[in-house]
Every structure is written in C-alpha cells, then in structure tokens.
Amino acid sequence: MGLRSRLGDMIRSNERRQRGPTKRQALESLIALGVPVGSVIDVGVQSGTQALIDAFPDRPHLLIEPLAEWNTAIEKTYASAGVSYQLLNEAATTAPGAVTLLLRSVLPGPNVSHAFMVDGDPTGPQYRRVGATTLDAAMRGRDLPAPHLVKVDVDGAEMQVLDGAEETLANASLVILEASVVNLIERGVEMDRRGFQLCELVDFCYYDRRFVQADMIFISRKIIKDHQLEFYRDGFDLARWSEFKV
C-alpha cells in the first residue's frame, strides 16, 4: 500500500476527511471530454497509483521507481488489476548516471515513505546510491503509444525529472505533478512555459488545517486546440457552470 493510501486510512480513522476533487474524478472528466491518452508514464510509484490504474486499465504503464523493495507490491497491484506494465528501478532526473537518495518514513513499520534526492555522496544508513536515467532515455526503444500521460511524484524533484523529458513532454497530453505551497505557483509558470495549461488541482492535503500540498494536472495546449477544448469557445453557457462545495 502506497503512502497516500496509508495516510488516507490514518486520516479517516481520526475522523478527518481529505477534501475533493480527487485525481480519479478529474481523470474521469478529462476522459469524458475526449482527451487522448495512449500510455501512462508513472514516475515515483511506490506500490502503485490507483487512480491511474482505474482510469487507464487497458493502456500500457511505464513505472519508474528507484526503490526495489516496492517491486513485490507493484507486481501484486498491477497483476491483480490486469494492467500491462514495464518497471524500471532507477531514479529519473536530469542526466544518466547515479544519484543519492535520503530515505525517510512518516509511517510505522519498515516501509520508506519518502526518498529525497540529495547532492554529493553522503554516507550512512539513511542514504542510498541508485542508478539514474532521464525520462527521455527511459522511453527510447519502448513501444509506448502517444500521447502520454506523465505523472511525477518524487518528493520535491519533479522539475528535475521534467528537465530530462523534453522529447517525452512533446508527446504528452497530460502531466500530473505533486506541488506544495512553496512551489505551486512556480511550477504553474514553468509548465505554462513548456506548453501546458493548468486544468485541475486535486487531492488537496492539509496540515494543522492549512493547505500544504496538492496534485496539479496540466493539459497540453496543442491537445486543447486540436480537440477544441478552449473555454467559452461557443460563448458562455450557464448550464455548464458548476461550483465545488466542501
């Protein structure tokens, strides 16, 4: 079970609920609008991303997860769902080679909940040296149909992953990034520069009743144009307007 699922169980046990909308709801809406997804590229998998499994069970998934101890759980999750997948145990970043991860957990038990990329080559039981690749290099030679949905959740190094994904992003329809209060605006500006428009904020998380992080879903402006998904393209229709209420 992944970090979000474990934390969700703990939150519900304390009679606190995560606010919507959720990644699954957003993906259902995008599918209904006709946004194409040929394959799923999931960077930072842990045991699996259930929303992507549920939304795209018949698409191939490329799973990039540097911690091999998650492999058994990944195999169980995707095999039980009947999802075709390829698994790569490397860290995706800006250049091939190796990176050092600082391992942490906020959960009871032996599972690692967070793996932070750190500079240099520090030593100690909390550090691990792992192989590294770029997302573009990981994609080469794989028969993964475009357009891609690219999801990146790597504990703060999301933009480093995208810096090594120029070719992949050129063939992506959707990008999902984890973002926090300290980098959400910066990431929105950067993704706009890369040709993507923000279309959803989902899976809101709070700490001490303050917003702390969410997932940002971006859609390619080329997809918006090609599939005629511009807002108010035919004028404003009040029947299509809705508001989210907690």
Image: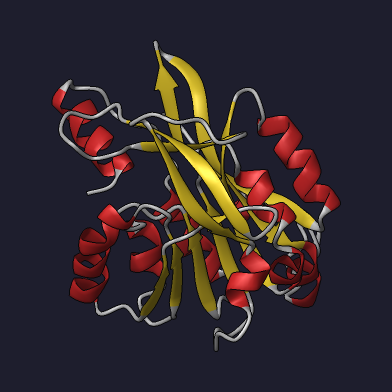
Image x and y of residue 21, in percent: 45, 42
Residue 35 visible in the current orientation:
no
Image x and y of residue 58, in percent: 38, 82
In the image: residue 60, left or right of residue 140 = left
Rendering quarter of residue 87: bottom left
Residue 163 visible in the current orientation:
yes
134 vs 202: above or below:
below
Image x and y of residue 133, in percent: 60, 62
Image x and y of residue 100, in percent: 51, 41
Please, which residue is most extreme toward the right here? 193
Taking the spot 64% from the left edge, 23% from the top edge, the residue there is 182
In the image: residue 229, left or right of residue 22 = right
Taking the spot 31% from the left edge, 30% from the top edge, the residue there is 105
Taking the spot 74% from the left edge, 52% from the top edge, the residue there is 197
In the image: residue 164, left or right of residue 46 = right
Q: How is the image coloured?
A: secondary structure
Task: Give 188 or 126, whichever is nearer the viewer.
Answer: 126
237 vs 52: above or below:
above
Task: Give 183 or 56, whichever is nearer the viewer.
Answer: 183
Task: Give 126 or 27, whichever is nearer the viewer.
Answer: 126
